[in-house]
Amino acid sequence: MRSSNPVFSRRGFSRDNGYAGFNTAPQAGGAAVGTQGNPYAQPQANPYATNPYAQDLQQGAPPQTPVTTGRMTMDDVVLRTGTTLGVLIVTAALSWVLLPVDDANISRSYGIGIGAALIGMVLAFVQSFKRKATPALIVSYAAFEGVFLGVISSIVDNRIASGAAMQAVIGTLAVFAAVLVAYKAGWIRVNRRFYGFVMAATLGFLLLMVVNMLFAVFGGGDGLGFRSGGLGILFGVIGVLLGACFLALDFKQVEDGIAYGAPKEEAWLAAFGLTLTLVWIYMEFLRLVAILNSSD
């Protein structure tokens, strides 16, 4: 199960059967799953084929006994996600307090924040290309990302829009809750078409942002204006919507991993993906608040 953030690929998307669990309706409590519908029952496409706790599912029948030890559960996902988000929040709070953004210190604080962001990006890329979760990498990513978020949030909150950070947090929590309710209610159907649309839209979004950044670097100003004014607001809303779509993909991946007997350590990858997506949504909200207040 690879993270579902807007940059990195997903192990659950197999070359043989497409996205894990598409066109299936597994029930984690032991419903019968056919070998054609269960991506974890096929040795060539199943990333968990060596998981001894998933062997009972490979014949298309529920386990003879309710074995849960060694298999990923929802509690595992919640615990690991709470750990990564907790580390991120603590380091963000510390950087907010210890790295002042007044006129005398803003350059130094901003430089530390950007450096932490680059280190976090490298750690995220390393983890994304590893076949197995490395908790130390994931927690370290959360720590460095927290430093970056703390500095950026402090700058926006203290120099552009008072209360911006809290507004962004509330917006992120609202999106998370809304997508979770919509997903559990069946209003969002995650299938091949949904996955393809989200990935294509995200690729286009990222390419536009890169082009805008290049124009800003070499041409000065706001580049093509995709991150300021009316266009900035529009693309900020699109960014939040894309983040919401990736949350749905994350929920689907967690659900499939639990249903098909993913090993317990895969919960760290689920936490990694959810953390990346939530950071994405938070940053888009923070940017939106900054743009809206700058245009007043």
Image (spheres, rainbow, N blue to C red):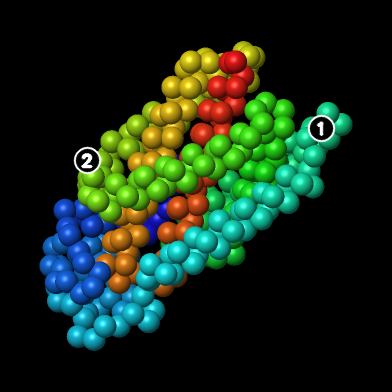
- Determine the secondary structure under disc 1: loop
* Image location of residue 276, percent across then percent down: 49, 48
Along the viewing direction, whichever of 246 and 216 lies nearer the viewer: 246
- Residue 30 appears in the picture as rendered: yes
At 35% from the left and 46% from the top, the residue drawn is 179
Q: Image height check: is 15 above or below 235?
A: below
Q: How many marks?
A: 2
Q: Looking at the rendering, in which quadrant would you find the C terminus?
A: top right
At 80% from the left and 39% from the top, the residue drawn is 100
Estimate how packed mark 2 is, as few (under 14), some (14 to 19) or many (20 or more) residues with alpha carbons within 10 Å: few
At 54% from the left and 43% from the top, the residue drawn is 169
At 59% from the left and 59% from the top, the residue drawn is 86
Q: Which mark is residue 193?
A: 2
- Residue that sits furthest to the right in the current view: 104
- Determine the secondary structure under disc 2: helix
- Residue 25, image quadrant: bottom left
> As drawn, is 232 to the left or to the right of 198?
right
Which-is-in-front pick, marks 2 and 1? 1
Q: Looking at the rendering, in which quadrant would you find the N terminus?
A: bottom left
> As drawn, is 138 to the left or to the right of 94?
left
Along the viewing direction, whichever of 161 and 217 lies nearer the viewer: 161
Rounded to the nearest angstrom, the CA distance separating label 2 from label 1 is 48 Å
* Image location of residue 219, percent across then percent down: 62, 13
Q: Which residue is mark 1?
A: 102
* Image location of residue 286, percent across then percent down: 56, 34
Q: Look at label 2 and name its amino acid.
A: Arg
- Residue 83, image quadrant: bottom right
Q: Image height check: is 101 above or below 273?
A: above
Q: Look at label 1 and name its amino acid.
A: Asp
Contact flag, marks 2 and 1 (Cβ < 8 Å):
no
Along the viewing direction, whichever of 296 and 257 lies nearer the viewer: 296
